[in-house]
Image (tube, coloured by chain):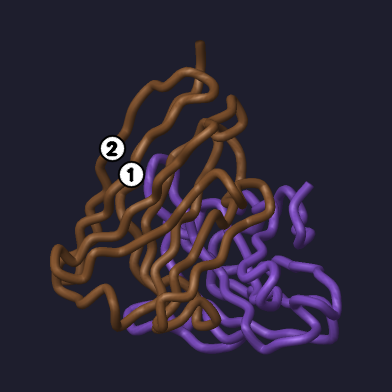
């Protein structure tokens, strides 16, 4: 069974940093586009970042220059390094698998991990 | 403000059909056949229901169908069932500078 398990949830002060992890089982991360999607409390879905099949990275304008997506093929784990965090980054962050790229949608989602940015 | 526009709510009685719209621009919905739809029940992760405008992943009932005309995509749920009550989000490929754009979501109520 294909599963994505996020970790790294936490409460962080504005301006702080946090790294999210997404451990994949039942699939090889490097064979798919992998993305992070977030959802602020009571709000809709917002695409955050994608790492493509070739390793090319893409970012939403709202996080570009602050967030970095990466993957460790040996650990089969996806990461999201979040720096200079702002209150508006508070959200549940989902790790998602492409079908196989993002154009085909995201067909596997993790359970989500919560990030709260507050002083 | 979301990049794609969806109605905030929709409703229908059991057995009826309901259609949810998703309006974008020629830079996203209208420019590519890469529209997806997601279903999200409260407290749960979203689930892919439709991809590439009309295709259904394995396991998704054929009561769910997708279509597109110009800059507007649509999700139709036929034969409404109680378990279809959920939030539905559309998304589209938006080009290399804005890879994925989502709609604001539509809350579907089964009366």
Chain letter for the residue marked with disc 1 in the picture: A
B84 over A33 or under it: above or below = above
Q: Give the drawing colour for chain B.
A: purple
Q: Determine crowd level at label 1: few under 14, some 14-19, many 20+ residues with C-alpha closer than 10 A.
A: many
Asked which secondary structure carries label 2, the reply is loop
Query: What residue is drawn where x is 29% and y is 78%?
Result: A30
Chain letter for the residue marked with disc 2 in the picture: A
Q: Which chain is brown?
A: A
Position in image of residue A45 (x %, y %): 57, 51
Give the residue pinned by disc 2: A8
A39 over A5 or under it: above or below = above
Asked which secondary structure carries label 1, the reply is strand
Cβ–Cβ under 8 Å for marks 1 and 2: yes
B102 over A101 or under it: above or below = above
Position in image of residue A83 (x %, y %): 48, 37
- Quadrant of the image occupied by residue A114: top left
Q: Camera-side residue: B85 or B33? A: B33
B14 on left or right of A27? right
Upstream in the sequence, badge 1 or badge 2? 2
Position in image of residue B111 (x %, y %): 59, 49
Q: Determine crowd level at label 2: few under 14, some 14-19, many 20+ residues with C-alpha closer than 10 A.
A: some
From this viewpoint, is residue B109 visible?
no
Query: What residue is drawn where x is 44% and y is 69%?
Result: A51
Query: What residue is drawn where x is 49% and y is 60%?
Result: B39
Give the residue pinned by disc 1: A20
């Amino acid at each position: 069974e294909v599963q994505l398990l996020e970790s790294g949830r936490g409460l962080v002060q504005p301006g702080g940093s946090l790294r999210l992890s997404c451990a994949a089982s039942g699939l090889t991360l490097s064979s798919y586009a992998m993305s992070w999607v977030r959802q602020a409390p009571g709000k809709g879905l917002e695409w955050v970042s994608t790492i493509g099949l070739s390793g090319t990275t893409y970012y939403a304008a709202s996080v570009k220059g602050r967030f970095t997506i990466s993957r460790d093929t040996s650990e089969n784990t996806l990461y999201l390094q979040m720096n200079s965090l702002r209150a508006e980054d508070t959200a549940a962050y989902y790790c998602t698998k492409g079908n196989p790229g993002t154009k085909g949608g995201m067909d596997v989602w993790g359970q989500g991990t919560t990030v709260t940015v507050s002083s | 403000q979301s990049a794609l526009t969806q109605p905030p709510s929709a409703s229908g009685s059991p057995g009826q059909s309901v259609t949810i719209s998703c309006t974008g621009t020629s830079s996203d919905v209208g420019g590519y056949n890469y529209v997806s739809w997601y279903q999200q029940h409260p407290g749960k992760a979203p689930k892919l229901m439709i991809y590439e405008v009309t295709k259904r992943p394995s396991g998704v009932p054929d009561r769910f169908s997708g279509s597109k005309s110009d800059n507007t995509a649509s999700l139709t749920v036929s034969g409404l069932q109680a378990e279809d009550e959920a939030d539905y989000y559309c998304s589209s490929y938006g080009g290399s500078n804005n890879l994925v754009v989502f709609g604001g979501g539509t809350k579907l109520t089964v009366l």
